[in-house]
């Protein structure tokens, strides 16, 4: 009798252990793990371009060509580029071949020399910019590589482009106010 | 009968002990980090770039086959603004060797968009993931994030 009870207790405990271990085995053997990682990134300030000053030739005489230097504080064309300080940009100028009357009835040639542009990354002015301030005597049809927004110095997140040019009125040029668009495009280049 | 039960008991102890002690787990060693980005300039983080590519480490029973599955985002977000996030079909790599080499992984150019089957090594399994973001020209500045979910399951093989 005692022996029978002992046997039953033994069978019961072994069966319980087997069930328990089976549950553990099934749950652990086919377990799953999930990890949640992140993708992170910081987008920097976008670029802004402002046509700060038009390239102004003022009054012109028929048959008399007139130039405005890129170092002319009052009359040179000035574009201001604002963005993330020290970041590399690519800049392009789309330059007109003619100025035209508003009604398109007459045109006047305009030209840009290979040294008619300066690029100021240091907060100088058209008349005071030096080579150390960026780029001087550059070809506006082919702006240099390596332009930055500002010089990387504290507080300077601007670059300015100074542009000169030359108009050549014909001897029978129609009187009036002539104008042409100069387009400045800039983009970050990732440097 | 007693002997039979004893054998089954010992057998189950061995098997369950084996399975229980080596259940797989995932450790995130590194997030996918793009750092500073310029508006309008796409930026790629190759899977080979230590410190920037995402890195996961899976540990478990050596030699066991795993099913590895990513749930990948298609955009990063910041305050409701989105930025496109791309994972090319070869953006994932893994290495189950004793000394995982991120620059020359044992199993390379894996498509993270589909479930991957691979075996754990003695030193577990290290998984790397690269990606590319495409900020718009007028992308709003700020810190963008997205969630990458990695699910790992024993296949039983």
Image (tube, rainbow, N blue to C red):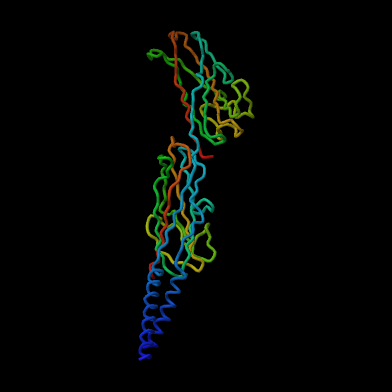
Q: Residue B75 at what x, y percent from top left?
A: 40, 45
Q: State the image coordinates of residue A154 (x, y, percent, origin top left).
A: 61, 33
**Where the N terminus of chain B falls, by quadrant?**
bottom left
Could you say where residue B34 lies in the image, as x and y percent from the top left? 49, 46
In the image, B154 versus A179, the foreground residue is B154
Tally the numbered discs: 0
| Depth check, front residue: B126 or A29 | A29
Say if B48 sits above or below A24 in the image.
Answer: above
Along the line of sight, the residue nearer the viewer: A65 or A75: A75
> Percent position (x, y) of residue B36?
51, 42
Q: Residue at x 48, y 63 (%)?
A: B125
In this view, the residue farthest toward the front is A1
Report the quarter where the C terminus of chain B lies: bottom left
Foreground pick, A56 / B92: B92
Q: Going 46% across and 50% down the picture, which residue do you hit? A: A38
Q: At x 49% / y 25%, what residue is drawn?
A: A50
Please, is residue A71 above or below residue B31 in the view? above
Q: Is residue B2 above or below residue A68?
A: below
Residue B76 lies, with reference to residue B153, above or below; the image says above
């Amino acid at each position: 009798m005692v022996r029978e009870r002992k046997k039953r207790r033994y069978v019961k405990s072994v069966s319980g252990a087997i069930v328990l271990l089976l549950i553990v085995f099934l749950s652990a053997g086919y377990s799953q793990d999930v990890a949640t990682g992140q993708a992170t990134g910081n987008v920097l300030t976008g670029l802004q371009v402002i046509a700060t000053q038009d390239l102004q030739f003022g009054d012109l005489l028929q048959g008399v060509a007139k130039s405005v230097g890129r170092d002319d504080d009052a009359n040179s064309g000035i574009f201001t580029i604002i963005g993330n300080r020290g970041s590399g940009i690519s800049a392009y100028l789309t330059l007109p071949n003619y100025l035209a009357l508003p009604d398109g009835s007459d045109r006047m040639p305009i030209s840009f020399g290979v040294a008619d542009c300066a690029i100021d990354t240091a907060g100088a002015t058209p008349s005071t910019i030096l080579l150390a301030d960026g780029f001087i005597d550059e070809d506006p049809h082919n702006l240099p590589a390596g332009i930055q927004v500002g010089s990387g110095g504290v507080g300077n997140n601007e670059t300015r482009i100074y542009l000169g040019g030359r108009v050549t009125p014909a001897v029978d040029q129609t009187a009036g106010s002539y104008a042409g668009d100069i387009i400045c495009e800039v983009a970050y280049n990732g440097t | 009968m007693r002997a039979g039960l004893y054998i089954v008991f010992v057998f189950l102890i061995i098997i369950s002990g084996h399975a229980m002690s080596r259940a797989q787990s995932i450790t995130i060693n590194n997030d996918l980090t793009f750092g500073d980005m310029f508006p309008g300039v796409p930026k790629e983080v190759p899977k080979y770039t230590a410190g920037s590519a995402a890195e996961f480490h899976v540990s478990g029973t050596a030699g066991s086959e795993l099913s590895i599955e990513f749930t990948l985002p298609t955009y990063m977000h910041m305050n409701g603004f989105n930025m496109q996030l791309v994972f090319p079909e070869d953006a994932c790599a893994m290495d189950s060797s004793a000394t995982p080499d991120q620059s020359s992984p044992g199993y390379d150019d894996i498509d993270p968009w589909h479930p991957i089957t691979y075996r754990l090594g003695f030193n577990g399994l290290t998984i790397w993931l690269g990606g590319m973001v495409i900020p718009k020209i007028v992308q709003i500045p700020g810190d963008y994030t997205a969630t990458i979910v990695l699910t790992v399951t024993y296949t039983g093989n």
